[in-house]
Image (cartoon, rainbow, N blue to C red):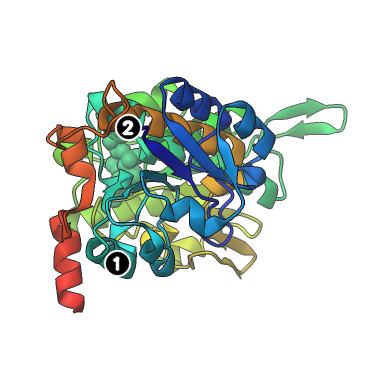
Amino acid sequence: MVLRVAVPKETARGERRVALTPEVVQKLTKDGLSVVVEADAGAAAFYPDELYRNAGATIELNANAVVSGGGLVLKVQPPSPSEASLLAPGTILVGLLAPSRSLETIARLRDGNVTAFALELLPRITRAQSMDVLSSQATVAGYRAVLLAAEQIPKFLPMLTTAAGTIRPAKVLILGAGVAGLMAIATARRLGAVVEAYDVRRAAGEQVRSLGAKFLELAINAEGQGGYARELTPEEKAQESAMVGAAVGQADAVITTANIPGRKAPRLISREIALTMRPGSVVVDLAAESGGNCELTRPGETVVEKGITFLGPTNLPSEVPFHASAMYAKNLQAFLGLLVGKNGEVVPSFDDEVLAASLLVAGGEVKHAPTRDALGAKS
Ligand code: NAD
């Protein structure tokens, strides 16, 4: 039987992305899969139904029929608990399932005998790079964060020499130079700002400098497992705070992206340090959802204190929905390359390292230990 791939319209508030683009649908239908797309699923990202139809998909008007028809269901955001209950037993769900924040949904997937892959659990290994949705979406977020900052400050970013005088370039400080931070550096540099950046992983220094920014260095190298950062000791935190504090006070815009996997985001900017910034300056905190790098950030809100603006955006990729969806869909296409065999059937076992690591729920069990523990603690 031909494998059915279903793409529902995203229902999370403010979500404009779609899991598959017409380009990737065409590839899947060419490979012999049958693709069902909910009407208007791509509309908010400017992929109209007609393009999906031309790519070989069937457009389905009934939202319930899209998800309840079985096969593979591809999502960007986790389904709500009631949407999870609509999935037929044996369905395979793939998406960013936010394991720690969607426990009720996960319990329903488990009880409904759905198999679920959470793409945020993909290992960060070379072979999985083409599927790495965290990287692709962080790239979008880093870009968009700079545009938000540029719109907010009352200044130009570039240096200008004009008949009306010379304008000095704005100073942008990027804290955390991982995927989002590096994209923010590149974007701010392209707009002509003077950019400084800091990361606890010393390896980030070379990448920062290659983008034309200054790397702020401490005598700390907190490179932890798998290329991620580890938490700092109290003494290291004090050193970090002194250096970051001095740089924050000089900046027109600060973009913070620091995260430690599985933990609360590190607090890099205290209220006291934040208020040393000049009125008119801005902090864009990309870690808002995981606790914030800045004490004054509130997730999803704009806070203004002493003329300084603190933005805590929680879904920047959705603000560039066309390209964020295009990158996400390409990541999914690569992931399906592992999950679907040559004859268009789901592979018989999920032993592959990448599939095994991202398998969240299967056979009525939660496979990811931290999520299983969290569910156990809740019940
Ligand atoms: P992330 O989102 O977990 O963290 C963002 C950045 O914050 C990281 O660079 C981290 O070092 C930094 N950070 C943490 N604590 C900090 C602190 N106290 N002060 C300043 N900075 C702090 O990370 P990410 O952007 O997803 O990726 C991080 C690393 O993983 C990078 O080296 C990246 O190149 C690597 N990576 C590898 C692959 C792969 O091989 N497939 C894929 C993606 C990322």
Query: For ligand 1, which image quadrant applies?
Result: top left
Q: Residue at x 19, y 68 (%)?
A: 374
Q: Earlier in the sequence, mark 2 or mark 1?
A: 1
Image height of 66 relative to 341, above or below: below
Q: Is 239 or 116 nearer to us in this picture?
A: 116
Q: Residue at x 44, y 48 (%)?
A: 75
Q: Give the amino acid at mark 1.
A: Arg
Under circle 2, the secondary element is: helix
Query: Residue 155, image x and y in percent?
Result: 71, 45
Tell me, yes or no, if residue 83 can be seen here. yes
Residue farthest to the front, as pictured: 1
Q: Residue at x 74, y 29 (%)?
A: 160
Query: Residue 200, image x and y in percent?
Result: 27, 42
Q: Give the amino acid at mark 2.
A: Phe
Residue farthest to the right, as pictured: 163
Name the image quarter holding the N terminus: top left
Tell me, yes or no, if residue 251 can be seen here. no
Q: CA distance from mark 2 to mark 1?
A: 24 Å
Disc 1: which residue: 108
Q: Is residue 353 left or right of residue 178?
A: left
Disc 2: which residue: 335
Under circle 1, the secondary element is: helix
Q: Is residue 160 left or right of residue 14?
A: right
Which labelled disc corresponds to residue 302? Answer: none
